Image: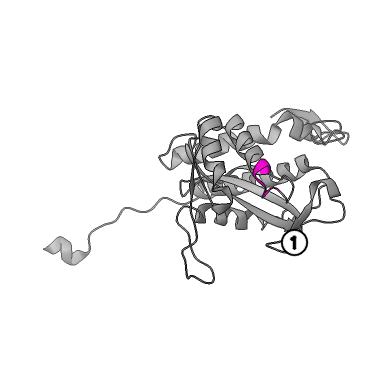
């Protein structure tokens, strides 16, 4: 990281100085893909530590509707009749490995339950991650969307439905990984509710929340003390 002297004599990162990527030109950060350049190496490092490849081939996708403040424009928010929420809908993509953290986040309109919006999300996923071949999702991605994704994007969509005659919270196979990640991101103060006027800024903050999760996980592993060598009890040695 580059450093530059501050006015008071102390150094600070070049990327955060006035007029830098996140200074006077705030929109330049999402446009330059800076947060993605931070996120992707971290995700690959975590996967390699757990014995997986650096990139996920199978992923899980899910959406979440969150309330939007008055600062959010009407052109990027709507009403979710299922959740009875006026706000934005986030789409999150997570690898299927247990140690995976969110790898992609998008915030199209809440009305993206329509097939064209879901096709847009899948198209962006294929464009940014050509290595992905399997996508697990809920029933919102079922129907004609399965054949369309296979024909045009070479993506295999596998839907995971909720078991019949079940009530309350039920842990669904595979899908619980992305549900867990959605709950983790909601712990971030600026993700519990959407305040951003631009969708690009909302997506960037979701990515920062994922980066925070990954850095905490990596530092926690490095700070763990080494386990002492186990020795046999005295009665075992005597035997």
Closer-to-camera residue (91/155): 155
Q: Is residue 69 above or below residue 132?
A: below
Total numbered circles: 1
Q: Residue at x 64, y 40 (%)?
A: 121
Q: Is residue 113 above or below residue 3?
A: below
The part of the chain drawn in magenta is 112-117
Q: Single out the residue that lies furthest toward the front.
A: 144
Residue 43, position as x, y percentages in the image: 55, 39
Q: Single out the residue that lies furthest toward the left.
A: 239
Q: Residue at x 52, y 32 (%)?
A: 151
Q: Is residue 71 above or below residue 55?
A: below
Indicate the quadrant containing the N terminus: top left, top right, bottom left or bottom right.
top right
Residue 142, position as x, y percentages in the image: 54, 48
Q: Is residue 193 visible?
A: no
Q: Residue at x 48, y 35 (%)?
A: 133
Task: Say whether residue 227 is magenta.
Answer: no
Residue 205, position as x, y percentages in the image: 72, 45
Closer-to-camera residue (41/118): 118
Q: Specify whether 183 is left or right of 59.
A: right
Q: Is residue 224 visible?
A: yes
Q: Specify whether 104 is left or right of 96.
A: right
Residue 37, position as x, y percentages in the image: 64, 32
Indicate the quadrant containing the C terminus: top left, top right, bottom left or bottom right.
bottom left
Count residues near mark 1 (Cα–Cα under 10 Å), then give few for <14, some for 14-19, many for 20+. Answer: some
Indicate the colouring scheme.
one colour
- Mark 1 lies on a secondary structure that is strand
Identify residue for label 1. Answer: 85
């Amino acid at each position: 990281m580059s450093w530059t002297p501050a006015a008071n004599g102390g150094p600070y990162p070049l990327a955060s100085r006035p007029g830098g990527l996140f200074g006077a030109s705030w929109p330049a950060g999402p446009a330059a893909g800076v947060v993605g350049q931070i996120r992707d190496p971290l995700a690959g490092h975590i996967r390699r530590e757990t014995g997986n490849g650096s990139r996920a081939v199978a992923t899980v996708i899910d959406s979440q509707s969150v309330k939007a403040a008055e600062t959010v424009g009407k052109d990027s928010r709507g009403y979710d009749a299922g959740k009875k929420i006026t706000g934005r809908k986030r789409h999150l993509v997570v690898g299927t490995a247990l140690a995976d953290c969110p790898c992609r986040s998008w915030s199209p309109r809440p009305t993206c339950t329509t097939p064209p919006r879901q096709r847009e999300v899948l198209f962006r996923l294929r464009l940014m991650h050509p290595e992905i071949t399997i996508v697990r999702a809920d029933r919102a991605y079922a129907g004609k969307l399965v054949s369309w994704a296979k024909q045009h994007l070479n993506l295999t969509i596998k839907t995971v439905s909720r078991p019949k005659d079940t009530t309350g919270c039920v842990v669904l196979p595979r899908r619980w990984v992305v549900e867990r990640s959605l709950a983790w991101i909601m712990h971030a103060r600026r993700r519990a509710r959407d305040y951003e006027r631009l969708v690009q800024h909302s997506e960037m903050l979701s990515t920062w929340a994922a980066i925070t999760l990954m850095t905490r996980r990596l530092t926690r592993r490095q700070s763990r003390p080494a386990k002492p060598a186990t020795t046999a009890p005295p009665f075992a040695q005597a035997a």
